[in-house]
Every structure is written in structure tokens, then in C-alpha cells.
Amino acid sequence: MHNWFDRLKTGLRKTHTQIVHGLDEFFISKQDKATREEALETLFELLVQADVGVKTSEYLVDKVKSRIQKEDYSDAKIFKNILREEIFNILTATRENPKGTLENPLQSLADKKLPHVVVIVGVNGVGKTTTTGKLAFKSHLRGQKVVIGAADTFRAAAVEQLAVWAQRSKADMIRLKEGSDPASVAFETVKKASENNASICLIDTAGRLQNRQDLMQELAKIGRVIAKENPDAPHEVLLVLDATTGQNALQQARVFKEVVNITGLVLTKLDGTAKGGIAIAIAAELGVPIRYIGVGESVEDLEVFEAHEFVNALFSETNN
Ligand SMILES: Nc1nc2c(ncn2[C@@H]2O[C@H](COP(=O)(O)OP(=O)(O)O)[C@@H](O)[C@H]2O)c(=O)[nH]1
Ligand SMILES: [Mg+2]
């Protein structure tokens, strides 16, 4: 498989089967004589099964209902096109980050020539370290100088994993001994990045936090010490979510959002799950943009999220 769109399409295949193929089968079984009630009920069920969630599924059903003329309920094509437009609207109606992005760091570079600082957060196993590594490498390929902070000081393996990416990305990596204060690592990383005139600073954090209180304190502390070195930082806080956990991911996002100012989401492991609808639920309920999606373990499998690509891949007629 070569290009990103093909990878995305393949990654979303099960979700496509769940929603789009599910609708096709319904309309075929009705031989173009579906009633409004049947069609909307089926749509609701298929969306919920794809982890779009009850609330967002109801919203989509209402939208479709308000836009479709009664006689058009027998037309699968009209029905799917409207659904697709409404999903696109949800995915694009999110709040943008005024400080810019890794690809386009508006504030840090323009104002003060300080590094654009990104903190990567999320629970254990969602793909934070992998994402940090992939982002470092992509920044390097764009010609940006990167410094990485290994602030998951609980797991030596995570640090080693990140060191490999740092080497590939020609990036300096700050590591302190196992069990050190993650905030110290974050501080040293931002400092080093400023000293080295690096343009990008990526900080990988730990997800092994016992309760909400610990989480709050640790992330708040990281934010505070970074701001001492650079008052505008962090410019981005990316929350990594594992798509295969479906509604659980949404719940995690709610908790993190209470604790820290999340500027964007990374949705990993969309490959091989039928729960890809969670992307729609997350965008609808949180209003935070999905910034990257992951469809596999290699560096080519993580890309900037583009709503039009997502809906094109999801609704692609050749994705069977
Ligand atoms: N299939 C798949 N696996 C992924 C993806 N992103 C990360 N992983 C895997 O998920 C596992 C946990 O990743 P890791 O970065 O260590 O998670 P962390 O605990 O949040 O730092 C690793 O085996 C990764 O290779 C993805 O998009 N797709
Ligand atoms: Mg990790």
C-alpha cells in the first residue's frame, strides 16, 4: 500500500463496512421502498454500533431527517450524501488553536524565535511515545530542529523507545534518571530547545497516573515549569486517544479536558477497528480539533487529520 489515502481507506474499512455498507444493505433489502422511520432507525443503529455515540447519532439522524424530502427515503445515494455532509460539518466545526501547529507554528516563531512547545498527554498504551517519535521525525523531514523530552520517567523502556526516534530525527533528547520529576524533564527540555535555537520541542509524558488528583497535579506542574522558561508555552497540548477503546476514549477526553487545556487530539489505532465513528463523537462533543490520526505503527501511518479525506475514505465506494 502506497499513499496515505489508501492507508486511511484500509484503516477505516471496518468502520466503512459498519456504517456505509450497512446502509447499502438496508436500502437493497427494502428494494427502494424504505419508509422514513425505517431508514432513520437503521441509520441510528448503525451509527451507534460504529461508536458514534447515542448523542451524536441522534444529532445526525435529526439533521438527515430535516434535510431529506419524504420521497427521497428510497434513494440510498441522496441519503448517504447528506449523511456525509453532516459528518464533515461536525468534523470541521471545532475550535482552532491561535498559537498554531507543529506544521505552522504561528506564534512562537513569529514573535520571539522561541521553540514551539508541544506536550503529549494521554493514558497508558494509547500511543503517546510512538506519536511523539513520529512527530519528531516528521518535523525533522520538514527541516525543523527538534528537541524531545522523555518525561515518562516511570518506564525506562519508553525512554529507550523514544531515543531511537530521537536518533532518526537528529534530535536532542532530554532524559533524567528513572523516577525523576517529569516536570524537571519538561523544564530542561524547553530550556535546551531555546539554547539550541530549536524550532520544535516535543514532550512525551507518562500515563500511569493513579487518579484524577495526581493527573491534575502532575500536568499542572509541567505547565507551570514550562511557562517559567517560556511564558507562551506550551503552545499545544495534544491528547492521544486509542480509537479501539471507543466510548472509553471519549470519557478519557472529558477527564483530561477538565484538567488541562487540550488544543488538539491524536486518534490512534483507527486501523482494524469498526469503532472509527468515535472520531465523529469526539469532534461533536468536545469541540477540540482532531489534529492527527494513526492507522498503523510505522511513521507513514500517522498524518495530519483532514476532514475531507476522512469522509472521502469513510464513504469511498471502493472500500469493501
Ligand atoms: N495498530 C496501531 N498501533 C499503534 C498505533 N499507534 C501506536 N500503536 C502501538 O500501540 C502500542 C503502545 O504505544 P506507546 O507509544 O508505547 O503508548 P504510550 O504508553 O501511550 O506511550 C505500541 O505497540 C505502538 O506501536 C496505530 O496508529 N495503530
Ligand atoms: Mg509511552
Image (tube, rainbow, N blue to C red):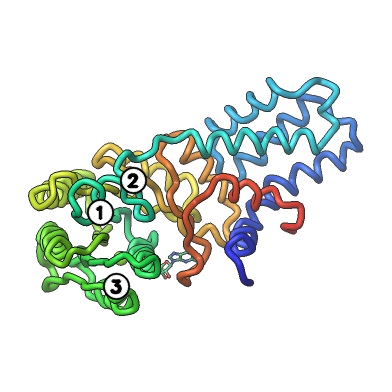
Q: Mark 1 or mark 3: which is in front?
A: 1
Q: Residues within 10 Å of mark 2 (few under 14, many from 20)?
A: some
The image quadrant where one finds the C terminus is bottom right
Q: N-terminal of the two: label 1 or label 2?
A: 2
Q: Which mark is residue 162?
A: 3
Question: In x, y percent, where is residue 313?
Answer: 65, 53
Disc 3, SS: helix
How far is the residue under mark 1 from the one under mark 2?
Answer: 9 Å
Q: Residues within 10 Å of mark 1 (few under 14, many from 20)?
A: many
**Relative to 250, residue 9 above or below:** below
Reading the image, the residue beneath label 2 is 100
State whether residue 287 appears in this view: yes
- How far across and down, in percent of the image, does residue 237 sit? 29, 48
How many tags in the picture? 3
Mark 3 sits near ligand 2, with its Cβ under 8 Å away: yes
Whole-percent x, y for residue 311 in the image: 62, 46
Marks 3/2 in contact by CB < 8 Å: the verdict is no
Discs 3/2, front: 2
Amino acid at circle 2: Gly
**What amino acid is labelled 3 in the image?**
Leu
Residue 20 lies, in percent from the top left, at: 72, 46
Q: Return the disc, 1 or 3, that comes first in the chain's sequence.
A: 1
Q: Residue at x 53, y 41 (%)?
A: 280
Residue under label 1, please give it: 116
Helix, strand or loop under label 2:
loop
| Kind of residue at badge 1 | His
Circles 1 and 2: CB atoms closer than 8 Å: yes
- At x 85% / y 31%, what residue is drawn? 74
